[in-house]
């Protein structure tokens, strides 16, 4: 409940912080619980409080912060759902993770999310990864450029033609937010110029969310000049008027809801509120019991910076992101910085 109320609601956040019983210490302790679901939900709660809120990030850091080791079992998990949630969390919380460099933890999360866009065969994971990309696209400066640098536009535009409506919707919203970055705007315009159907789908699903005015102006210029290839017959069904399950907004929650089904992964794209995502907690609870003896100890999470090069890291094993620069200046996006 606290996660849902605080996301983008400063009045409720102030009320929660004014409650005597509330403390981040309680949530931070849950990051070391034996149950996988408890740890994942605790990380999601911290990410929700910290999202685009520097003051809350400082408070979490002052009350102990969170260690990168807490996320490693999820980042290296064979379960795509675990990886996707943890990847988003480490990017949001990277500034207050003391035992890993901010750039490395951010690159880890971004690379895992883009890999899921490329490789996953699950509609739920494709929707969730696109949703996470959308929210990260309007956080701090440098993150959108890092996402674009590892070919995210290519994978997201392919998902615009996906057979699953929820996948198409989430990909469209992610592209809408990324279009505020000049390099993404240019790539997206070129792809839409070669296939007008991409633009039709993009505009269909971003009616209530943000798309760069510069991108829209560029598209109007292309239409005025002419020469665009026609949309082939039969493809208009991808943007039918009747929709069975509206896609989630980039502000909807990635968090678990143990009482709801995956059909609840949706929220108004104009309302910063989180919606329940999945009922997979029962399966995850079973898996957590079977893996509890083999997981990395989270109690030994505090690793001195001088020894970090010798410990196993998901960064060394999975991340090759030469183009990522999380300290670059914002490319004129005009978005909120965390």
Image (cartoon, rainbow, N blue to C red):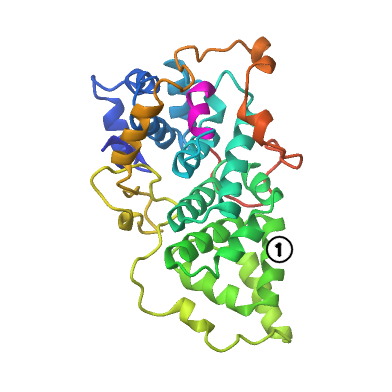
Q: Position of residue 293 (x, y in %)?
A: 41, 20
The image shows residue 178, relative to residue 283, as above or below, that is below
Image position of 223 (left or right of 93): right
Q: Position of residue 80 (x, y in %)?
A: 48, 44
Q: Residues within 10 Å of mark 1 (few under 14, many from 20)?
A: some
* Residue 309 quadrant: top right
Q: Position of residue 10 (x, y in %)?
A: 35, 38
The image shows residue 228, relative to residue 327, as above or below, that is below
- 73 inside magenta stretch: yes
Residue range of the region highlighted in magenta in the rendering:
68-75
Q: Which element type, helix, strand or loop, lies under badge 1?
A: helix
Q: Residue at x 57, y 38 (%)?
A: 109
Q: Name the residue tied to disc 1.
A: 187
Q: Position of residue 249 (x, y in %)?
A: 42, 56
Q: Residue furthest front?
A: 290
**Does residue 179 appear in this view?**
no
* Residue 288 quadrant: top left
Q: Residue at x 65, y 77 (%)?
A: 195
* Residue 50 quadrant: top left
The image shows residue 81, relative to residue 189, as above or below, that is above
């Amino acid at each position: 409940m606290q996660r849902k109320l605080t996301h983008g609601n400063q009045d409720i956040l102030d009320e929660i912080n004014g409650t005597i019983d509330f403390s981040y210490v309680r949530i931070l302790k849950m990051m070391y619980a034996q149950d996988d679901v408890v740890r994942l939900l605790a990380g999601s709660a911290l990410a929700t409080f910290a999202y685009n809120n520097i003051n809350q990030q400082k408070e979490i850091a002052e009350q102990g912060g969170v260690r990168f080791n807490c996320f490693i079992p999820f980042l290296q998990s064979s379960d795509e759902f675990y990886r996707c949630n943890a990847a988003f969390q480490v990017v949001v919380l990277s500034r207050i993770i003391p035992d890993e460099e901010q750039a490395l933890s951010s690159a880890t999360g971004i690379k895992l999310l883009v890999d899921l866009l490329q490789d996953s065969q699950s509609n739920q994971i494709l929707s969730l990864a696109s949703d996470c990309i959308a929210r990260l696209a309007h956080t701090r400066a440098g993150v959108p450029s890092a996402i674009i640098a590892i070919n995210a536009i290519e994978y997201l535009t392919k998902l615009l033609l996906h057979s699953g409506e929820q996948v198409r919707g989430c990909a469209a919203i992610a592209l809408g937010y990324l279009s505020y970055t000049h390099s993404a705007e240019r790539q997206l315009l070129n792809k839409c110029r070669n296939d007008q159907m991409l633009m039709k789908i993009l505009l269909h699903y971003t009616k209530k969310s943000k798309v760069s005015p510069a991108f829209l102006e560029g598209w109007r210029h292309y239409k005025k000049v002419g020469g665009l290839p026609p949309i082939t017959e039969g493809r208009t069904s991808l943007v039918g008027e009747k929709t069975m399950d509206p896609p989630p907004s980039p502000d909807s929650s990635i968090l678990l809801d143990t009482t709801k089904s995956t059909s609840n992964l949706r929220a108004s794209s104009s309302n910063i509120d989180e919606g329940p995502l999945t009922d997979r907690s029962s399966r995850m609870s079973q898996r957590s019991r079977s893996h509890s003896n083999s997981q990395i100890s989270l109690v030994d999470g505090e690793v001195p910076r001088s020894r970090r090069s010798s410990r196993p890291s998901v960064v060394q094993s999975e991340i090759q992101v030469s183009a990522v620069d999380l300290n670059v200046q914002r490319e004129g996006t005009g978005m909120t910085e965390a």
